[in-house]
């Protein structure tokens, strides 16, 4: 490998869109003329990146599977949808990783993601552990190898989150440059990461020591270059993109890794034909030979982290206020100066209280069915992903003698919905009356149903009144009549099949 290298990382993700009672995605008119946003973004981004059209310098055209040359993660819920509805795209993504892995001594471009895209510093330690294990299990299932790295939703991080990754063998993750707090110099002195000289160098990897005694490698991407790709038009011309990437790799001292991380949807959805600019740049970099294309795993195999870093706790790549966009106390948004973003704190408060109630109920009910309900939950992905022999062994390992499988599945599925109601998109946008917040309320409704708190006619039992009171404080800026309590009631009337009873999970 050239000691001057380039790594382009794409975070490909869509929130789960399925009706949690039926498993089907409803029609989403805002995605028209496509039936829903998964279909639209697949046609605009995911599929084109598996066969990007390249206009060759000498004339003629070719196609390039960008996934064979870049670093990437694809959200497990998105990969599950692709597998079911666009299997050729799913197969091409996996094949791209296999090609890249073969070219780089087993260091393919794909790495794992926390399963349900919840904000890890706001999650309980139990949920952190489960989310890491489900993400790693899904990756092994799809890519046929263990994951070396793991993407953190919104790159939201703190030390406890890094401990959760390292405890299950994750070796590295990628963060934004402002998420480094301080760097330890070669003389042993701690220096603020944003100071110069001696501060953060995004061209090298760093190691974070953890209280447990473990370590994890952190890579901080080139923020200016990533902004250029995501927002400032670098995907309008493949030659411009090539020049910026190569110049970043050739700057500073050797060895140097020029790397960027952006939403993968930049390449074709946010920027039409962005996948073509990326494909052209990947080909040009290979032809020029000034810097080599690499993946994080391949680079770290030859250039392991030596300098120590301390992460800036409770930070993310998409909120200037740390993680308050998902907890409250943040006015990030485009609604304008008169908009009230207090709904975010109210939604977090309501769902946190529900989460804690459901956890207590799971522990009590699950304890009568499963040898260790929390260990069973950690391993639950094996049950819905595994072959028959794996499933059989799972039941032998976890189910108590005489316990009903269907009842155990009901409570495990309840916990699955209880975590999915924290999918980060529910808090990200300006107003709670949109698709994303409605989806987390659907998961709350599904969890309530599986816990036995929904009557046959779709009304909530009296014990849920405190939840409705809390949700009534989640109000829309667009409609004086809308609040989340009303939305949840409507979901239980319309989305839940009439007369449904809690069905077992897969």
Image (cartoon, rainbow, N blue to C red):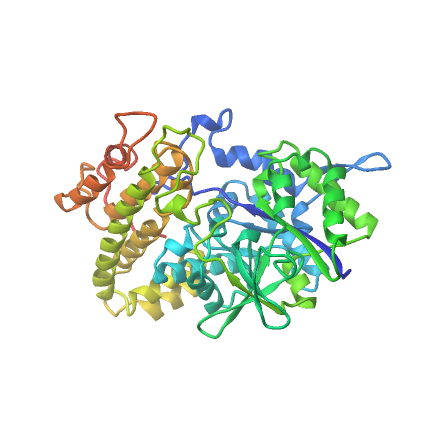
Quadrant for residue 3, please give it: bottom right
Residue 21 in sight in this render: no
The answer to whether residue 173 is above or below residue 342 is below
100 or 267, which lies in front? 267
Answer with the quarter of the image where residue 202 lies.
bottom right
Q: Position of residue 382 (x, y in %)?
A: 43, 61
Indicate the quadrant where residue 442 lies: top left
Residue in the image at 17% along x and 44% along y: 466
In the image, residue 224 lies at what x, y percent?
63, 45
Left or right of 180 on screen, residue 488:
left
Question: Residue 278: horizontal and vertical position, in percent?
Answer: 69, 41
Give the left or right position of residue 289, taking residue 163 as reference.
right
- Residue 55 shown left or right of residue 68 in the figure: right
Above or below for 359 versus 457: below
Is residue 319 at least partly visible in the picture? yes
Q: Residue furthest left?
A: 462
Compare residues 70 and 36 and report the one nearer the observer: 70
Instruction: Identify the residue at horizontal 38%, vertical 60% (top origin).
Output: 380
Is residue 64 or residue 305 the one in the foreground?
305
Q: Residue at x 51, y 68 (%)?
A: 169
């Amino acid at each position: 490998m050239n000691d001057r290298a380039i790594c382009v990382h794409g975070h490909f993700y869509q929130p789960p869109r399925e009706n949690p009672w039926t498993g089907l995605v409803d029609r989403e008119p805002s995605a028209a003329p496509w039936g829903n946003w998964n279909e639209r973004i697949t046609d605009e981004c995911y599929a084109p990146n598996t066969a990007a059209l390249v206009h060759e310098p000498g004339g003629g055209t070719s196609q390039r599977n960008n996934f064979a040359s870049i670093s990437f993660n694809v959200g497990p819920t998105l990969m599950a949808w692709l597998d079911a509805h666009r299997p050729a795209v799913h197969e091409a993504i996996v094949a791209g990783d296999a090609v890249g892995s073969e070219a780089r001594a087993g260091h393919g471009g794909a790495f794992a993601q926390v399963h349900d895209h919840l904000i890890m510093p706001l999650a309980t330690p139990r949920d952190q552990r489960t989310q890491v294990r489900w993400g790693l299990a899904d990756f092994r299932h799809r890519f046929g190898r263990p994951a070396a790295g793991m993407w953190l939703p919104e790159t939201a991080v703190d030390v406890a989150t890094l401990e959760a990754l390292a405890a299950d063998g994750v070796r590295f993750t990628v963060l934004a440059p402002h998420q480094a707090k301080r760097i330890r110099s070669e003389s042993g002195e701690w220096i603020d990461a944003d100071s110069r000289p001696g501060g953060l160098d995004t061209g090298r990897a760093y190691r974070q020591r953890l209280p447990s005694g473990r370590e994890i490698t952190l890579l901080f991407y080139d923020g200016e270059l990533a902004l250029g790709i995501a927002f400032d038009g670098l995907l309008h011309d493949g030659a411009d993109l090539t020049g910026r990437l190569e110049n970043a790799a050739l700057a500073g001292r050797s060895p140097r890794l020029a790397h960027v991380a952006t939403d993968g949807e930049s390449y074709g959805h946010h920027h039409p034909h962005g996948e073509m600019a990326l494909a052209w740049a990947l080909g040009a970099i290979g032809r020029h030979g000034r810097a080599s294309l690499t993946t994080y795993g391949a680079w770290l195999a030859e250039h392991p982290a030596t300098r120590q870093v301390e992460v800036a706790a409770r930070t993310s790549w998409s909120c200037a206020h740390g993680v308050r966009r998902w907890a409250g106390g943040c006015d990030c948004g485009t609604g304008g100066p008169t908009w009230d973003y207090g709904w975010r704190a109210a939604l977090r408060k309501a769902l946190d209280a529900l989460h804690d109630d459901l956890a207590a109920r799971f522990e009590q009910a699950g304890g009568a069915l499963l040898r260790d309900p929390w260990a069973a939950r950690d391993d639950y992905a094996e049950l819905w992903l595994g072959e028959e022999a794996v499933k059989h062994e799972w039941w032998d390992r976890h189910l108590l003698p005489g316990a009903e499988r269907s009842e155990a599945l009901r409570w495990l599925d309840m916990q699955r919905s209880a975590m999915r109601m924290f999918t980060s998109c529910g808090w990200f946008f300006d107003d709670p009356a949109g698709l994303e917040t409605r989806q987390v309320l659907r998961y709350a409704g599904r969890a309530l149903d599986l816990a036995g708190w929904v009557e046959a006619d779709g009304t909530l039992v009296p014990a849920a009144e405190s939840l409705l009171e809390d949700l009534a404080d989640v109000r829309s800026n667009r409609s004086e009549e809308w609040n989340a309590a009303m939305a949840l009631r409507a979901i239980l009337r319309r989305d839940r099949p009439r007369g449904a009873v809690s069905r077992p999970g897969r």
